[in-house]
Amino acid sequence: MTRSAIQTSDAAPPAGPYSQAIRAGDLLFVSGQLPLDPRGSLVGHGDIKAQTKQVFDNIAAILREAGSSLEQVVKTTVFLTSLDDFSSMNEVYASVFKSPYPARSTVEIGRLPGGMLLEVECIALVERTPS
């Protein structure tokens, strides 16, 4: 199986040696996205709803670049610096996805750099490219 990197300037650039996403067959593995705009600046300092929206804007841009969409997401993992933010994050999350919702795990982590409150990664389906 071949794999290919996905990169778009419509989402925050990687902050290290990793790809925004990797396509492997009909699956797309999107790296953890942070609440950074496409220039790499933090959005919504201290505001979990604004940060969650930015994270999903980044994910949507990466999915589009790969030929997928939020409707094709099958699994998400949400990392929160405080589970006290779960309800507010979940409100935005519920506006992003429709039923049937993706499978999801949500975990509290120690911290993220620079005032970031969450990170989200996902796995999505991608249409097979005609051969």
Image (cartoon, helix red, strand yellow):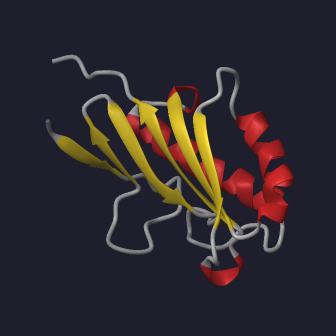
| 31 lies above or below 27 | below
Task: Report which quarter residue 108 is drawn in.
Answer: bottom right
Q: Position of residue 129 (x, y in %)?
A: 26, 22
Which quadrant, please, contains the C terminus?
top left
Q: Is residue 107 left or right of residue 29?
A: right
**Farthest residue, direction bottom:** 114
* Residue depicted at 45% across the width and 30% down the height: 68
Q: Residue at x 73, y 42 (%)?
A: 93
Along the line of sight, which residue is nearer the eye, 28 or 100? 100
Location of the N terminus by quadrant is: top left
**As rendered, which of 123 and 110 lies closer to the eye?**
110
36 and 84: which is toward the camera: 84
- Spot occupied by residue 38 in the image (x, y as percentages of width and height): 56, 62
* Residue nearer the viewer, 131 or 91: 91
Query: Residue 19, image x and y in percent?
Result: 35, 59
Residue in view at x 45 percent, y 40 percent: 123
27 w.r.t. 3: above or below: above
Residue under the point 57% across and 52% down: 58
Which residue occupies the extreme top position in the image? Answer: 130
Residue 81 found in image quarter: bottom right
Count of labels in the image: 0
Locate residue 27, reporting x and y percent. 34, 34
Judge from the rendering whether residue 92 lies leftward or rightward of residue 19; answer left or right: right
